[in-house]
Image (spheres, rainbow, N blue to C red):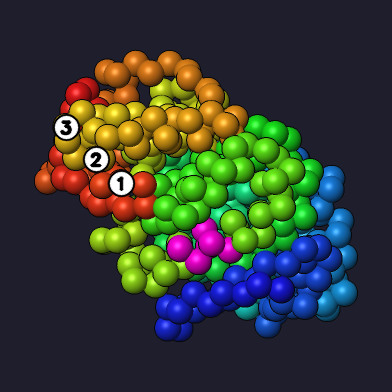
Amino acid sequence: MKSLRVDLSERSYDILIERDLISRIGEFVTSKGGKAFVITDSNVAQPYLGKAVKSLEEGGLTVKSVTLPAGEKTKSFSTLPMLYSFALEFGLTRSDVVVTLGGGVIGDLGGFMAATYMRGVNFVQIPTSLLAQVDSSVGGKVGVDLPEGKNLVGAFHQPACVLIDPDTLSTLPAHFLADGMGEVIKYGCIKDEKLFKLLEEIGGDTARLFGHIDDIIYTCVDIKRRVVERDEKESGERKLLNFGHTYGHALEKINNFEMSHGAAVAVGMEYITRISESRGQTRPGCAERIAEVCREYGLNERPSEDIDGIVAAVKNDKKSGRGGLDVVLLKDIGSAYTFRTTADYFRS
């Protein structure tokens, strides 16, 4: 088992990474009240919900589960009342625990439900997608989307622990694996040139990728862990984790959230790097390296990129304010920084 500790004083928690960990989660999920409320989705329930519930029950917990439709549209404010009602019917208290079993949508939604139900209950992240395992399950960002944009309602609510089972990736369809690779590539771009070069060397070969996947997950999580410890509430360094996301979130919004997050981030990373290269802010050649590695891992989607719609959506981004907009640029692969500008930067 690989383990990492996120050191946030009284909000500290462990991240555990091990094959077939889902069959043992009952050893690590605790509840003073003896109840666990499991939230999952229709893609994850069939292969993993039964195994998770069995392990929790063997650990002495009384379990209730709810299965939601898979997809970004579930991460909506309108889903929350149903979750609160189910939790109340179950008798869930502040001494109990919410368990999110799924990808980023379930983790964000279930985490926000846990943050707001009875003013906050503990929750445990069990991420089953690559995107969630390398990124969204760690750091305590939880929330829901509004029609006007992604993650516009949310909170910082750190999990009690994060349990990562890389075996769940074996059942992922190719497009979900590609989705997660968008975030993996991001980590190489902003903090780890060695990781980026490894991804270039693997060249999109799925068998070779899975041969390295445990270490890749560990590397990405370790980067995020260290960033979150230094900047939990995103006032400084943590903003670097948004590389490609400002444009990417806008792209998701104008395409009615029918584009995957990883694909949108891939477009965003390449797009903003081409702009920054043209302005002399980034070493020449970085954008083409990003574009090539994204193509190798199946991130080839190019939907509507109406620039007026993009700029309008960026102006609603939570990172935009009276003083302008912080965008994340690269000095070079492995080295990122924030640059204060406006939404019109994307018209360059």
Q: Range of the magenta residues?
A: 218-223
Residue drawn where x is 66% and y is 54% of the image:
213
Front-lying residue, 311 or 85? 311
Instruction: Report whether 132 appears left or right of 56.
Output: left
Instruction: Report whether 220 appears left or right of 3.
Output: left
**Which residue lies under the disc numbered 3?**
279
Instruction: Report whether 302 appears left or right of 341.
Output: right
Prevailing secondary structure of the magenta residues: helix
Position of 87 relative to 146 (above/below): below
- Assign a secondary structure to mark 1: strand
**Which residue lies under the disc numbered 1?**
332
**Disc 1 and disc 3 in contact, CB within 8 angstroms:** no
* Distance (Cα) linking label 3 and label 2: 8 Å
- Assign a secondary structure to mark 2: loop
Residue 163 at what x, y percent from top left? 67, 66
Residue 265 at what x, y percent from top left? 44, 36
Q: Amino acid at mark 1?
A: Asp
Q: Which mark is residue 253?
A: none
Q: Amino acid at mark 2?
A: Thr
Residue 184 at what x, y percent from top left? 52, 48
Residue drawn where x is 34% and y is 29% of the image:
271
**Disc 2 and disc 1 in contact, CB within 8 angstroms:** yes
**Which residue lies under the disc numbered 2?**
282
Residue 185 at what x, y percent from top left? 49, 44
* Distance (Cα) linking label 1 and label 3: 14 Å
Dot 1, how many residues are within 10 Å of its Cα: few (below 14), some (14-19), or many (20+)? many
